[in-house]
Amino acid sequence: MKYGIVVRIILSVVFVYTGIVFIAQGFSFLHKRSFYEEKNAIISQIKVSYNGSDPEDTYYEVIVNYVVDGKQYTSKLGEYNSGMHEGDEISILYDPNDPKKIISSSVVSLFLLFIGGFVFIVVGLAISLLRMILFFFSTRRQSK
């Protein structure tokens, strides 16, 4: 029985910690967005690579071209979605101090980080709360 309690505590801590990390990444991304400037870019290439024989295990590397202060840049975008195609114009955010550093201007990633973090924290706390409720009822039953 004690082994089950330890597993639940560890599981709860892992879920809450993961949620906190997701939310911290969301705030970091939000902070970056406030200092970056928006620019249009052209998707010049989408590299597809497969990890192993599983077609579901596919990695997409999106390469974009954009111009800042008259200088042409080519960078990897850290995001891909199935609506992206070579030649498409997309909106990016770049670091004005280092224009090679870019992030997607899409708020979907930001939304997923915050929602995902919230869900992980709720699940972790629910695991702990469920354990406390079960413990409370088991001690009340034993005292009768």
Image (cartoon, rainbow, N blue to C red):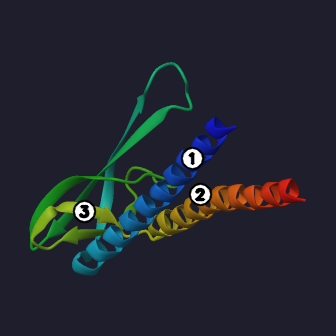
Gap in angstroms between the C-alphas marked 3 and 1:
35 Å
Q: Which mark is residue 124?
A: 2
Q: Earlier in the sequence, mark 1 or mark 2?
A: 1
Q: Which mark is residue 102?
A: 3
Secondary-structure class at tag 1: helix
Q: Residue furthest bottom?
A: 34
Q: Earlier in the sequence, mark 3 or mark 1?
A: 1
Residue 82 seen anywhere in this rendered image of the structure: no
Residue at x-position 22% and y-position 79%: 35
Task: Establish if 140 lies above or below 82.
Answer: below
Q: Which residue is mark 1?
A: 11
Q: Left of 14 or right of it: where is 88?
A: left
Q: Residue furthest right?
A: 144
Residue at x-position 62% and y-position 46%: 8
Label pair 1/2, CB-CB below 8 angstroms = yes
Label pair 3/2, CB-CB below 8 angstroms = no
Q: In the image shown, does 142 or 112 lie closer to the viewer? A: 142
How many other residues sit within 10 Å of disc 3, few (<14), some (14-19) or many (≥20)?
many
Residue type at the position of mark 3 = Ile
How many other residues sit within 10 Å of disc 1, few (<14), some (14-19) or many (≥20)?
some
Task: Establish if 87 lies above or below 34.
Answer: above
Number of marks in picture: 3
Q: Earlier in the sequence, mark 3 or mark 2?
A: 3
